[in-house]
Amino acid sequence: MTRKEFLDILESSLRGQLPPSEVEANLRYYREYIAGEVAKGRPEQEVLRDLGDPRLIARSILNAAGNRGFEDAGGESRRPEGRARGGRQNGRNSHILSWKWILILLAVLLLALLLVTRVMFVILRLFLTPAFWVLIALAFGAGYFFRRR
């Protein structure tokens, strides 16, 4: 692939998806980058191979542009593909709790319930031991004994 082919593919992938000024800025960047690397003595084919597929570069640029809308030459508002108004992408609302968060919440609640029941079991087991009742009897007995005197 030549420099011209690389830049043509990049331009065709970005046209209509970004404002013309941003398309030109990106083309200028890659044009200057390639020229700078070639001026350093690297072969053009090696530079282009290291850059990779211009379609993937264009996709990265478009993903970085995000949900920004822009107006085309006719004054009509345009958005990058895959996004619609209202923050919806591919039919899903990004602000709604996902099923993963619901599962995490349920797991936390279950662990809290298990912890509370475990503490209650330990307390109940303590009350059921004979030594506990002997101590209680001694405490009440001693209190009764000292009150009478």
Image (cartoon, rainbow, N blue to C red):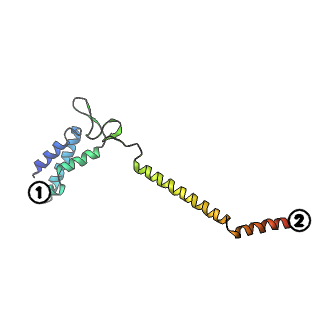
The residue at the point 23 percent across, 33 percent down is 72
In the rendering, at what x and y percent does residue 44 appear? 11, 56
* Looking at the image, residue 79 lies above or below residue 35: above
| Amino acid on which disc 2 is placed | Arg
Disc 1, disc 2: CB below 8 Å?
no
Mark 1 nearby-residue class (10 Å; few <14, some 14–19, many ≥20): some
* Looking at the image, residue 60 lies above or below residue 114: above
Determine which residue is flagged by label 1. 45
The residue at the point 41 percent across, 43 percent down is 96
The residue at the point 45 percent across, 53 percent down is 104
In the rendering, at what x and y percent does residue 57 appear? 21, 50
In the image, 131: left or right of 79? right
Front in this rendered view, residue 56 or 75: 56
In the rendering, at what x and y percent does residue 141 appear? 81, 67
- Secondary element under disc 2, as helix, strand or loop, is helix
Determine which residue is flagged by label 2. 148
The residue at the point 22 percent across, 44 percent down is 25
User: Residue extending furthest top?
Assistant: 74
Front in this rendered view, residue 79 or 110: 110
| Amino acid on which disc 1 is placed | Gln
